[in-house]
Image (tube, rainbow, N blue to C red):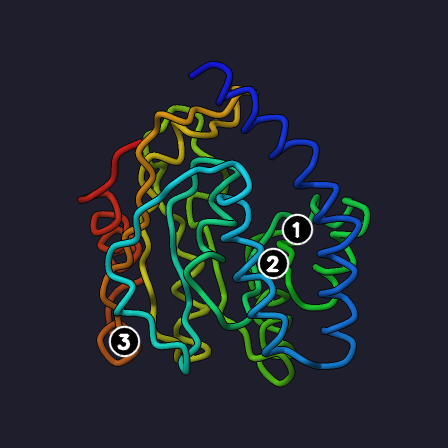
Amino acid sequence: MKAKALFQTLVYNIFFPLYTYLIGAPIVIIAILLKNYKFVGWFNHNWGKAAFACIFQKFEVVGEQYINPQKRYLIVSNHGSSYDIPAILSIIESPISWVIKDALLKMPVMNILFLLGMGIPIPRSNARESQKRILKHIEVLRQSMDPNIVIFPEGTRSITGELNPFKRGFTKIMKNYQMDILPITLCGFYKFAPRNRFLLNPTSKLKIIVHPPISYEQAKNIDEKLLAKQIQQQIKSVYYP
């Protein structure tokens, strides 16, 4: 099993990034510039699946029937590993933009993708100003790419495997743009690829659980703090690290 862990780690940390930077990212950049957003969604979806296939790692998906490919969701998920992004991409075929730390804009090549619409940076300013800039950024994206929006309300990857409290900022996105919320629980991903360990753990049982969407009409009148807490409890109810 140690040999498989080493194989997976080398492929994911060396060969897969080379493919992403040298082939995948340029293809997506060209597709975005050509405004072929359907292809962008398709390519990123298959990139997500390839992240698992190239290391021969199986995962289970529960509740995939709740995803309507014709709708655009505000996707809310727990965050425990570097594999969370390919996990979500592997089940969503339409374009996605991620709410990200502005520090990620310093990554070569990937920063171009983020600036072209695949990332919604959180500015390092006061909370109110950050919220205004995020909402303005989303407004521009909705008029062009019209993506799903993914946010990890914990703000960062869990260090212990336990869920951190959910910040309520995502509720403002939901209310401003009347988006349905799609809660997703990522199970086993913390043990598979935690932030404090180099080797992947191939024995971890990976499961992606898609919960029934929460419509804007259902959520619009719920107190923001209460809504964030309810969604965290829903995600946590079936979670294991």
Say which quarter of the image contains residue 142: bottom right
Instruction: Indicate which disc, 1 or 2, sits on the residue closer to the N terminus.
Output: 1
Instruction: Identify residue for label 3.
Output: 215
Instruction: Indicate which disc, 3 or 1, sits on the residue closer to the N terminus.
Output: 1
Q: Quadrant of the N terminus?
A: top left
State the SS at label 2: helix
Instruction: Identify residue for label 2.
Output: 130
Residue type of the residue flagged with mark 2: Ser
Residue 125, numbered label: 1
Residue type of the residue flagged with mark 3: Ser
Say if mark 3 contacts mark 1, CB within 8 Å. no
Quick one: 66 or 74, which is closer to the camera? Answer: 66
State the SS at label 3: loop
**Which residue is located at x 45 percent, y 49 percent?**
87
Quick one: 131 or 150, which is closer to the camera? Answer: 150
Q: What is the CA distance from the residue labelled 1 to the residue labelled 2?
A: 6 Å
Residue type of the residue flagged with mark 1: Ser
Label 2: how many residues lie within 10 Å, few (<14), some (14-19) or many (20+)? some
Q: How many marks?
A: 3
Say if mark 2 contacts mark 3, CB within 8 Å. no
Please say if 50 is above or below 145.
above
Please say if 83 is above or below 219.
above
**Which residue is located at x 56 percent, y 69 percent?**
42
Given the current orientation, which residue lies at the most extreme left position? 237
